[in-house]
Amino acid sequence: MPNIPQIPLNDGKAIPQLGFGVWQVPDDEAQPAVAAAIRSGYRLIDTAQGYDNEEGVGRAIAEAGIGRDQLFITSKLRNGAHEYDAARKAFDESLKKLGLDYLDMFLIHWPVPDQDKFADAWRALVALRNEGRIRSIGVSNFLPSHIDRIVAETGVKPVINQLELHPHYQQRDIRDYHARHDIKLECYSPLGSGAVLDNETIAEIAEKHGRSVSQIILRWELDQGLIVIPKSTHEERIAENIEVFDFALDDEDRRRIDALDDPENGKTGSFPETMNDLF
């Protein structure tokens, strides 16, 4: 079983560097997918209220046959529950669906700027952390200005910002900010929602190493100290994506992938500035 590195967080905790995500996985498919991931050696499982699959994830956790302390479970607050009391209630619902009595990490999923209540949601997460019901708290899809605001209003930094990040969208412009504030970056859609898998440059590097394209991309991200949460519902790909700790890219490989960044056109998902859907 792969020995996955642990990344230290600014609150003294640590998180596995490679985990398993379940975005766009229906609830009835989440259970077998997460079960396969745990069998393959994943210990970080990432879900969200907005994915509507926490119950399936919870069933897989309950049947995993390993100690709760060996797992790192993350969920995220839905956009329509940013008011303080609503955020606390929504968190309780997540625990019930997952069948757990605490979460290792809970994130605000999006800042939802038109609603302008993300600071209230952050206060709720801080309180839940102080009560011991969440071990670590963080954010997702936050811009530096959003982070500056919640820190100014609470004095508490997020441990992680979960962002879309992959070879076509490398988020170079905000990496220095996160490094200065010791906020780790966690990549969702680390394979570009499949858009990067057809890249000819990465295919050449994969052939050179006798590896799959997805393995090359994940290795490139891990080499930069990023946390990654690839998703699949296919057991063989789930297993393949964790087998990335027994080979190394060279400097030329990394330079070639670095050159694929396309900040203007590479993003596949929504933008934090304009994502205001409530779910």
Image (tube, helix red, strand yellow):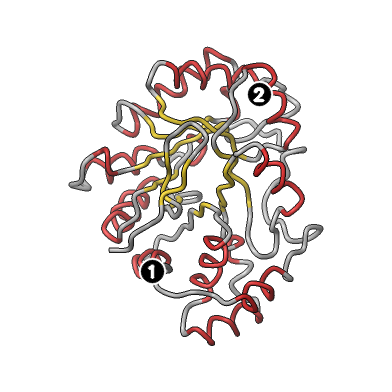
Q: Amino acid at mark 2?
A: Val
Report helix, strand or loop for mark 1: loop
The quadrant the C terminus occupies is top right
Depth check: give the residue in front, 56 or 108.
108
Query: Which of pointers 2 and 1 lies earlier in the amino acid sequence?
Result: 2
Q: Left or right? Give the position of 223 relative to 28.
A: right
Residue at the spot x=36%, y=27% of the render?
95
Residue 112, visible in the rendered structure: no
Check residue 207 in the rendering and tell me which mark sits there, or answer none: none
Residue at the spot x=59%, y=16% of the render?
83
Depth check: give the residue in front, 3 or 72.
3
Q: Amino acid at mark 1?
A: Glu
The residue to which callout 1 is attached is 243
- Report, in whole angstroms, how far the alpha carbon at label 2 lies from the one at label 1: 37 Å
Q: Residues within 10 Å of mark 2 (few under 14, many from 20)?
A: some
Q: Residues within 10 Å of mark 1 (few under 14, many from 20)?
A: many
Residue 230 position, x and y percent, is 48, 58
Q: Left or right? Give the position of 173 relative to 59.
A: right
Residue at the spot x=48%, y=53% of the render?
229
Residue at the spot x=51%, y=67% of the render?
219
Residue 171, visible in the rendered structure: yes
Quadrant in the picture for residue 53: top left
- Mark 2 and mark 1 residues within 8 Å of each other at the beta carbon: no
Report helix, strand or loop for mark 2: helix
The residue to which callout 2 is attached is 151
Which residue, as the protein is rendered here, is positioned at the far top? 85
